[in-house]
Image (tube, rainbow, N blue to C red):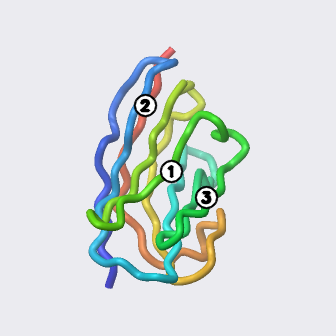
Amino acid sequence: QVQLVESGGGSVQAGGSLRLSCEHSRFTQSACMAWFRQAPGKEREGVATIRTAIGYTDYADSVKSRFTISRDNAKNTLYLEMNSLKPEDTAMYYCAWRDGFCSLHAGQFTHWGQGTQVTVSS
């Protein structure tokens, strides 16, 4: 079982920055890790993915150029650096893991963290 624990959420003004972290319990060569977000009344949205071993990344169009996903395999930690935050970024952010190829579809991930709330004010 892969355990995931997010941290770093909070409240920030529009234009500000925030870094989310996700500590996970194991390293798997073939794994993909990702960040998803969900606002009230909206579907869960894929934000970014990263191939854990080799670092290939993918981003949703809405966050491309503003967010950066990265990982420190030695620390078993996933990061999401968020810059130029907008009120539309307000959501619960979730860390996710799967043993397989990367995608931005939530249903393909088998392990999830508890979520961390990000609120961006005008």
Residue marked by disc 1: 69
The quarter holding residue 106 reads bottom right
Say what amino acid the circle numbered 1 marks: Ile
- Nearer-the-camera pick, 80 or 72: 72
- Inter-mark Cα distance, 1 to 3: 7 Å
For the point 58% across and 54% down, the residue is 48
Which is in the foreground here, disc 2 or disc 3? 3
* Residue 81, position as x, y percentages in the image: 45, 40
For the point 65% across and 63% down, the residue is 104
The quarter holding residue 111 reads bottom left
Callout 1: helix, strand or loop? strand
- Inter-mark Cα distance, 2 to 1: 19 Å
Residue marked by disc 2: 119
Horizontal side of 21 relative to 60 (left or right) equals left
* Residue 44, position as x, y percentages in the image: 59, 56
Q: Are marks 1 and 3 in contact (CB under 8 Å)?
A: yes
- Nearer-the-camera pick, 19 or 111: 19
Say what amino acid the circle numbered 2 marks: Thr
Count of residue discs: 3
Mark sitting earlier along the chain (2/3): 3
Say what amino acid the circle numbered 3 marks: Thr
